Amino acid sequence: MLIKSEPVVNQNSSPEVKAVVINNVNKGWPKAADYKLDVHTILETAIEIYCAILLMENPFPTSIQEVEWAKKAWTLAGHHHNTKLTHDGGILKLITARSMHIHGQFKSKAHPIVATTFGFETSAEKGVQMRNRLLVSELKQDSAFIFCVHGSSIDEHTSLYTNPAIQQIINEVLFKNKSDDAIKWGKYYNPFPQVAFALTLTAIECAIDEWTLDSHEMISFKEDDYSGVFNSTYAGDMPISTLLQYLSDIVGTSS
């Protein structure tokens, strides 16, 4: 469910003010430095709230959703700081740019954790490369990578959702430092959003896919390639009681 507006203290006493641009020389992509300093704090908060919306709603939004959620985040940021600043097209671009950034965060953290957790190796030896390819096949068969203990079939896999790679990636992206979003904005991440959880599993699958060829090959975590994987994961047959219990435990484990 989309984040609701927060109550504002003395909202009527704070007239809406236009965000002032101080640098019109750059006609390319907008920068925070293009705006007066009073905009920067609101923008930083709006970006953090926008990321929370992505991780609660859809990390692969349509262009219409991006703009809608960016406007919502900007309004909520103003409420948080008891300030009413209007946004312009440049501000919305700076906020919506975080859609790709959040993908990159999950993917970049998943890459080394997946390699270490599952035992992938970089080597020119054919035997090692073959083992990597077999491991990819085993892990993706019936989504074995989401289990902690792997058997020879899905009926023999145990400890659903407790593979340590899942929690490690979530910790690295959202809970590592006190300034990280999930700690700073705990009310949006407790219980942990199911959408964010599905994105974590999708990032793990992308990182596993990088070992499909003879040598490790970086794969871009792009919407065209992985939004379908995300959608099938999010809408898949995840045992809801087990999932809800796990999501409730994530914050307690990582905070």
Image (cartoon, rainbow, N blue to C red):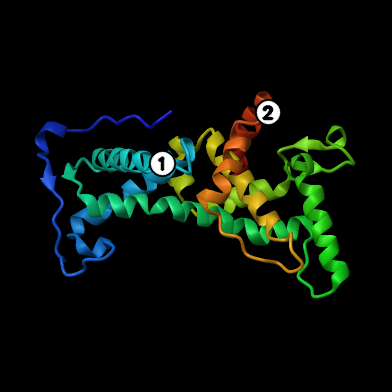
Q: Position of residue 64 (x, y in %)?
A: 34, 39
Residue, disc 2: 237
Q: Position of residue 98 (x, y in %)?
A: 40, 52
State whether residue 179 appears in this view: no
Question: Residue extending furthest top?
Answer: 241
Q: Quadrant of residue 26?
A: bottom left
Q: Position of residue 119 (x, y in %)?
A: 79, 60
For numbered disc 1, what is the local secondary structure? loop
Q: Nearer the observer, disc 2 or disc 1?
A: 1
Residue at the image point whose x is 11% and y is 45% from the top: 17
Front residue of 125/146: it is: 125
- 135 to the left or right of 15: right
State whether residue 19 appears in this view: yes
Residue, disc 1: 62
Residue at the image point whose x is 78% and y is 36% from the top: 159
For numbered disc 2, what is the local secondary structure? loop
Depicted 118 relative to depicted 242: above or below: below
Q: Position of residue 9 (x, y in %)?
A: 20, 33
- 81 to the left or right of 214: left
Question: Residue extending furthest front?
Answer: 224
Distance from the alpha carbon under mark 2 to that under mark 1: 25 Å
Among the two numbered marks 2 and 1 on one chain, the one whose residue lies closer to the N terminus: 1
- 22 to the left or right of 214: left
Count all numbered tags in the image, as a single digit: 2
Front residue of 45/102: it is: 102
Q: Amino acid at mark 2?
A: Asp
Q: Quadrant of residue 70?
A: top left
Q: Amino acid at mark 1?
A: Thr
Q: Quadrant of the N terminus?
A: top left
